[in-house]
């Protein structure tokens, strides 16, 4: 069935270090991969996304890579700052007959230690 | 301000007492959806609506109902709440009927069923 796995479930890094979160999806028909950030007590918000025809996308300190063959995609955050502390959700979007179904991973709680 | 508004934000109720969580968006979005967020499980889709004419079940629809009588509103109805419906609920919308991009989330409604 359709599934998105996400690792690690928790991650602690020192301020200034890099953080990497990895996701695996099951359905090879997945074509869109968004990442959402949820700060404590807040709503999830899109931070970056990538489509299946692109291997890598970067936006300042964050980047996402996609390996379609292995069905893996990853979020990379460089020069982490305390405000990066949040729960991060990866997701995979699968095109159904007339709509896109989005499957979310279980989330990664990132703590950046000052 | 463009936003998705949910009410109530917090609710404690008892088993069997019908309740409705309202969701309204002012962005003229076609697509709306409800998710529940539980620790370790990520965001799971309850129901979605591609437009005012199409509403369908998501992955965890049992115990819930929805309606889409007008474009801006998408209420979630719990006819007979049970303790296993204690959760954090998010409404989300997207501009496109079939959803091909960013989801805009409401601020969430934390429900406790005793």
Image (cartoon, coloured by chain):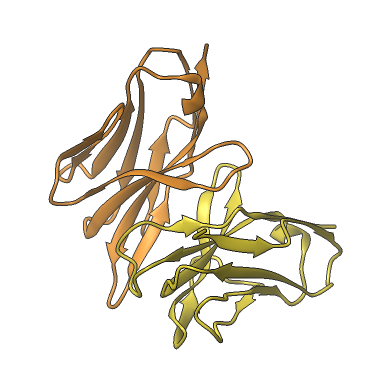
Chain colours: A orange, B yellow
Residue sitting farthest toward the front = B1
Relative vertical location of residue A103 with respect to residue B74 in this rendering, above or below: above
Q: What residue is rendered at 57% in x and 76% in y?
A: B73
Between B77 and A46, which is closer to the camera in this rendering? A46
Whole-percent x and y of residue B52? 47, 85
Between B41 and A82, which is closer to the camera in this rendering? A82
Whole-percent x and y of residue A53? 13, 51
- State the count of labels: 0
Q: Which image quarter: residue A65? A: top left
Left or right for B73, reference B9: left
Left or right for B80, reference B108: right
Q: What residue is rendered at 26% in x and 54% in y?
A: A32
Image quarter (top left, top right, bottom left or bottom right) of the C terminus of chain B: bottom right
Q: Which image quarter: residue B5? A: bottom right
Q: What residue is rendered at 27% in x and 56% in y?
A: A27
Q: What residue is rendered at 22% in x and 55% in y?
A: A28
Whole-percent x and y of residue A68? 17, 46
Whole-percent x and y of residue A42? 59, 43
Left or right for B30, reference B77: left
Between B4 and A25, which is closer to the camera in this rendering? B4
Relative vertical location of residue A69 with respect to residue B45 in this rendering, above or below: above
């Amino acid at each position: 069935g359709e599934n998105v796995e996400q690792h690690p479930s928790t991650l602690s890094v020192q301020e200034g270090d890099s953080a990497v979160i990895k996701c695996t999806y099951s359905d090879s028909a997945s074509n869109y991969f968004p990442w959402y950030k949820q700060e404590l007590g807040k709503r999830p918000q899109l931070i970056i996304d990538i489509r299946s025809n692109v291997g890598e996308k970067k936006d300042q300190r964050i980047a996402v890579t996609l390996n379609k063959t292995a069905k893996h995609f990853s979020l990379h955050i460089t020069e982490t700052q305390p405000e990066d502390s949040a729960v991060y959700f990866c997701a995979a979007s699968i095109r159904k007959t007339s709509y896109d179904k989005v499957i979310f991973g279980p989330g990664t709680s990132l703590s950046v230690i000052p | 301000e463009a936003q998705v508004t949910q009410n109530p934000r917090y609710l404690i109720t008892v088993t069997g007492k019908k309740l409705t969580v309202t969701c309204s968006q002012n962005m003229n979005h076609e697509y709306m959806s409800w998710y529940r967020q539980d620790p370790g499980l990520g965001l799971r889709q309850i129901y979605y609506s591609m437009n005012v004419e199409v509403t369908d079940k998501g992955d965890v629809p049992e115990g819930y109902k929805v309606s889409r009588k007008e474009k801006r509103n998408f209420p979630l109805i719990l006819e007979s709440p049970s303790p296993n419906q204690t959760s954090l609920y998010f409404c989300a919308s997207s501009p496109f009927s079939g959803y091909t991009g960013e989801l805009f989330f409401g601020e969430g409604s934390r429900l406790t069923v005793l």
